[in-house]
Amino acid sequence: GVGKDVIANAIHMGSPRRDGPFIPVNCGAIPDSLLDSELFGHEKGAFTGALSQKRGRFERANKGTIFLDEIGELPPAAQVRLLRVLQNREIERVGGVKTISLDIRIIAATNRNLEEMVKDGLFREDLWFRLNVFPISIPPLRHRSGDIPALVRHLIERKAKDLKLRDTPGLAAGSIDALMAYDWPGNVRELRNTLGVASQCGKCGILARDIVRDSIGGLAETNQQLFYAVS
């Protein structure tokens, strides 16, 4: 919820690979039985239900960036296969014999302590060393309130596009102060949901200060779990 995907996308867009694909992967959301197919692809007939060839996330990210979110959730067997990809920059589709070379940037993120997981035998040490090249620690939103104005602009523009609004809503005077004064226990996810509620309640294309405050209050009280569920 601290905005890992936003930061990963910003790294991609600020790099020479910006014209290539940006492929996000939530490692904790893919069932173990589908992990190889999702990451590396498969050939037609590789297993029951494989009715056609499929390009995996790594292959689709070629010439661009793959973002492996929640990498600490990968099971041990998948960690071995990922290490091989990092070392050789090559994959094979499930059921295939052709080696496919890759030219990609790999960004990984987690909310878990991988060093502690290595000590506990839950994460491979060699994979940890491969990943820990340029670590970036992202503090919670309450510790970087100076980021809120830029995040608000970005999130409102994205919400306006999702809602197919003709004009992007603006913020009334004082709204940013209200947003910066809140400590955001739900981090960027909570900020996004708050702005989503305010965008749908606002009139005349303006997110008034009382609407923003009401939206924050709703999240802080009984509706907090609902907003998380629909995010």
Image (cartoon, helix red, strand yellow):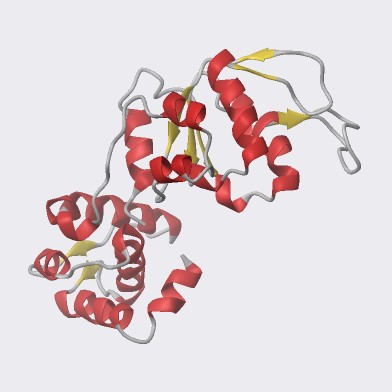
Q: Residue at x 52, y 15 (%)?
A: 103
Is 1 located above or below residue 40 in the figure?
A: below
Query: Is residue 98 rendered to the left or right of residue 105?
Result: right
Residues 50 and 31: in front is 31
Indicate the quadrant where residue 198 lies: bottom left
Q: Position of residue 25 (x, y in %)?
A: 54, 42
Query: Is residue 89 rendered to the left or right of residue 170?
Result: right
Query: Is residue 173 rendered to the left or right of residue 102?
Result: left
Is 210 located above or below residue 132 in the figure?
A: below
User: Residue 189: in sight, yes or no?
Assistant: yes
Taking the view exactly as shown, the residue that stands out farthest to the bottom is 222
Q: Position of residue 48 (x, y in %)?
A: 91, 42
Looking at the rendered structure, the number of numbered marks drawn on it comes to 0
Q: Residue at x 37, y 52 (%)?
A: 158
Q: Residue at x 46, y 65 (%)?
A: 231
Q: Position of residue 136 (x, y in %)?
A: 28, 36
Is 160 located above or below residue 121 in the figure?
A: below
Query: Is residue 227 rendered to the left or right of residue 173?
Result: right
Q: Residue at x 38, y 29 (%)?
A: 132
**Quadrant (top left/top right/bottom left/bottom right) for the N terminus:** bottom left
Indicate the quadrant where residue 221 lies: bottom left
Indicate the quadrant where residue 223 lies: bottom left
Q: Position of residue 183 (x, y in %)?
A: 19, 68
User: Residue 60: in sight, yes or no?
Assistant: no
